[in-house]
Amino acid sequence: MSARDVVIVEGLRTPFVKSGTKLAKIHPAEIGRVALKELIAKTNLDVDVVDEVIIGNTGNPADAVNIARVVALNAGIPQKTSAYTVHRNCASAMESISHGFEKIKAGTMDVIIAGGTENMSQIPWLMPQKFQDLLNQLVAARSTGQKLGVLGALLNADFKQVWELVSTPPMLNTKFKPVNGVMQGLTDPFVGINMGQTAEILAKEWNLSRREQDEFALRSHLLAAKATKEGRMKEEIAPFMLPPDYKETLTEDIGPRETQTIEALTKLKPFFDKLTGTITAGNSCPITDGAAMLLLMSREKAQALGYKPIAKIRSYGFAGLEPERMGLGPVYSTPVALKRAGLTMKDIGLVELNEAFAAQVLSCRKAFDSDTFAKEKLGLSSKIGEIREEICNVNGGAIALGHPVGATGSRLIITLMKEMKRRNIQFGLATLCIGGGQGGSMIIESEA
Amino acid sequence: MSIQESINVIPQKIGDSSIAIVEFDLVGEKVNKWNTQTMTRFKEVVQELAKSSYKLIIFRSAKPKIFIAGADIEEIKSLNTKESFTKAVGAGQEIFNLVEDLPMPTLASVHGACMGGGCEFIMACDYRIASEASETRIGLPETKLGIIPGFGGCIRMPRIIGLQAALDIILQGKAVAAKKAAKMGLVDRVVHPSILAEQTLRYAADLLKEGGKKRRKTFCPTGLVNKFLESGLGRGIVFSQARKGVLKMTHGHYPAPLTAISVIEKTYGMSDRTRALKIELENFCELGITAISKNLIHVFYLTEMVKKQTGVANSSVKGKDVKHLGILGAGTMGGGIAYVAADKGIDTRMKDINMDAVGKGVKHARDLWQKLVKRRSLTEYDFRRKIDLVTGGVTYAGFGQSDVVVEAIVEDMEIKKKVIAETAKNMRPDAIIATNTSSLSVTEMANGHPRPEYFAGMHFFNPVHKMPLVEVIRGAKSSDETVATIFELSKKMGKMPVVVKDGPGFLVNRLLLPYMAEAAFLMQEGMDIDRVDRAYVKEFGMPMGPFALMDEVGLDVCLKVLKIFKKAFGARVEIAPCMEKIEKSGRLGKKNLKGFYQYDASGKRLQVDPNIYSELGLSAPTNPLANKDCIERGVFAMINECSLALIEDRIVETPDEVDLAMIMGTGFPPFRGGLLKYADSIGTKYICDQLDHYLSKGAARLKPATPLVNLAKNNSKFYK
């Protein structure tokens, strides 16, 4: 079968909520279920036509290892329909769309739900290997004497866990110290530095001032707060009724601050490099919980079912780079996507560039506009092209909204396509950097 | 085909031993059951087996979901004298004795319903193996039909599973799943259904290896408390507690459980089987001929009748299966409807004006399931599956998928019409809207719908999860398919639908209203609220008295509907002066914890509010009327109105439907067989005469209606 058009019928997400707050106790599968169930309701989708459900997630909860299947069944997708989970770190929920895109384009399938879900509040602390060994010994112990022996060792180890946790620097792993799963996930396993430290490298190499970064963070908050206030975010957010009492319903993101000031941002201390650093909690994205889902179809199927799609997927591209400069990922992946789409940066009318760190976004924009960088690093004859401020993250970004790692990729596409429609833009680019040293980009075209 | 083929003996070999498999497969029927024919044939089979040299006998069923469903109720219904009961039931006892006395061991292999006589049969066998399929249910439901187990069940069950467990099953007419049965010792082994046949043979082989002996299983209590309760002294306590429990539940209106207790008390531990069975038989026959038992069997038939009905006369019309249900209004009714729908696997979407309201509806359903989870009758996983089916919002999202939308918003004709019109625009053209109105005209409301043939009434009763009745209201333009779909949907939700014609109060509320109005007059005339309610509950058997009922419904609603009825029915409806004063008293009933009764914060009914009489302009109650008059005035008012509703207005077609609706919708005492069975039992003439008598004392509203007068002329019955 020849290549077919792949359209996005609709996209919907839950509010993005700062970790440890309103959604902290809600399982990521449940957050995903709400997003999917509301997407089904909004589109009046006959779930029987869904061929596959593909969902991104990075926390990989032990009680729902293939979380996509759990989300699908709980949301009422028929049991006959297959579902699987994808993991490409920060781009997991863009990866899921790319899978759906390929399968529909090739004619293998017609209707795919693609999305992502994450509850970073629930990423567990991990026990050190030493402690796990003792637990295994306890379970295997037969005689009471043996059991008591192991129990003694466990109590001793337990004490050491707590002691090492409070008495050693946070980034230092020791024999008995429990490991914070979130922090571990945000540490590059190849070069051993934290994501924040990768941003510090970019800030220094691209000569970005603290002020510049803080101003960017402020911009993110003010734009996101404005978009919320003016009701634009409502178009992409499904209300989330909070169990078990349902007395409170979340209808907005918890993150954007209308009252954010540059002064408050300036006061914050650098988090990753106390002496020479510029990356603070204020100019980085917060740890966040949320989910986002899209309904993808072949154009033929969408027409047959009477849907009016919002956008068409033109292309996507992923590319790798040095893990310690992972923040520049978009610079590497975007040329790939542009080439596949047969477009240049000049054609792009709107950009969602994920805001992992202000420094990372700003260095990306510099690199996009640099002939030297293009020649030396990308092997291109000239720069990719400027990303003008007025078309970049016009409704704010992850610094304000947050970055639920496994869901962001889909959120970018949803936000992008809704804004393209409002502005009547033909081509839009969503792109993000990926922990581990990769970039992901996707280009969509308005259907209006 | 002959009855011979209904019970087949299949010889088989296990190693060197010959065994026989006796297979039940009642020809021409979906179920296996005990009736004269099968009993006679089975007796022959057992007598042959007794003479045979088989080393072991296996009993099993060839029906897919039934082992033996019990005794043929049609046959029980036809028995009217002690003699006929003695003959029929005695024959059953004798055959099960023959089974018990077979020289070789017997093994029952149970898959599917094993109820009543089926359960009594396997208890006469030596060993029992069952499949763990959900269809496998083992129990003794006899007391629900006003009788007791009569084929030795009262004797054998306590011996096998002990006194407490046996009383629990027999007194409540319970059935248990296979695993539970194994836990209590009612069956010996439980296996997956697909290997039941093979495992039955293996069990037989094990038994043969152990010597192939008969066994007399006797219950051995474990634990100190249980040992004490099985002892001579402890038993006394068990029996007296059981009696207290039954009386508390039934107010003495249901003799069967009490009889069962006394039979078990007399026979437990008795070594003389003949004497014990004789006691059981005598007591069974006493109960069998009572009107109560006949009435309960009548009610059983009414519920069976609904299972077969489609709600429309045209048999070619089938209701559509409803997979997606929309609900407008997430209040108590909306939330309750969401609960019963999602509980049965229907995807449910609520809409209300704000998320707070929607949240309340979801919580209403969630709380009901949570109670079951706490009681361990629902697993966490099943809970998840059910609650995930309940969603909602403030838009029409999801309504495009709905097969049916139930409207449960404010009782206001104009608002309802507007919302119905708007909703229809957001639905598929072939989808149905059903209103849950309790007082407005469905026919008029249908004018709000652009396609009124897709509109009908679906009237649930509060609390929705408890009250089994749904009145399916056929508007003037409702299509057959619409009515059939709502009828089918009600059944899918586990409810009992009755199709009624449009008219003020439809059926149940139309009959209840005169009853409640009459209660107010009783109070006006000096009766104590508590005394009237008690009389209705304890003497007549209603689940609650009229005043408690009015509190539940809401006093404002009662008064509003009374006024509507007064307009519609004229002189037949009068409003007692004290009732008129309710309006200004601020008393709304249970919903504001202030009605005829006082309530605690959680809504639990306490005592009658001592201030109520003076507040309504009455002096302290003097109780001038006898309880009998109080009850008659209320109940006869219902019968009087019913004669008009049934015979003149044809709101429903048959007395069967009236009785079913009253029992399922108001809890009218089932042992009386329903409102009209009761009317027939005391005679239309008596009712008419009494109404005339009350009329002569000035109660114009109680004037006997023409159709009732016509019946009374020859003392004819409502039931033909």
Image: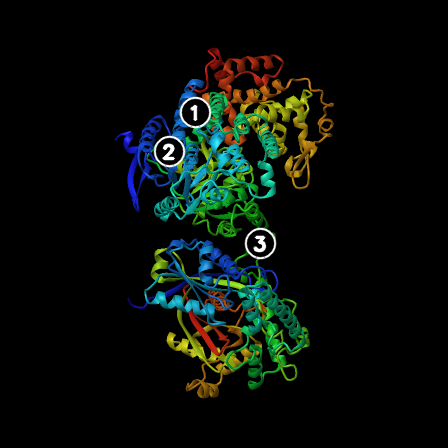
Give me the disc on residue B654.
1
Q: Quadrant of residue B475?
A: top left
What is the quadrant of residue B5 in the picture? top left
Residue B49 visible here: yes
The residue carrying mark 2 is B102
Give percent across and percent down for residue A237: 53, 60
Which chain does the numbered disc 3 sit on? A
Q: In the displayed structure, would residue A250 be above or below residue B402?
A: below
The extreme left residue here reads B1
Locate residue B511, reporting x and y percent.
53, 26
Spatial CA span between label 3 and label 2? 61 Å
Look at the image and tell me in which quarter the N terminus of chain A lies: bottom left
Asked if marks 3 and 2 fall on the same chain, the answer is no
Q: What is the spatial separation of the Cα atoms under label 3 and label 1, in whole angstroms?
A: 47 Å
Where residue B414 appears, as percent x and y from the top left, is 53, 38
Of the pair B182 and B430, the residue shown nearer to us: B182
* Residue B480 in the image, given as x and y percentages of width and height: 38, 35
Kind of residue sitting beneath label 2: Leu
State how the image is colored: rainbow
Residue at image mark 3:
A243
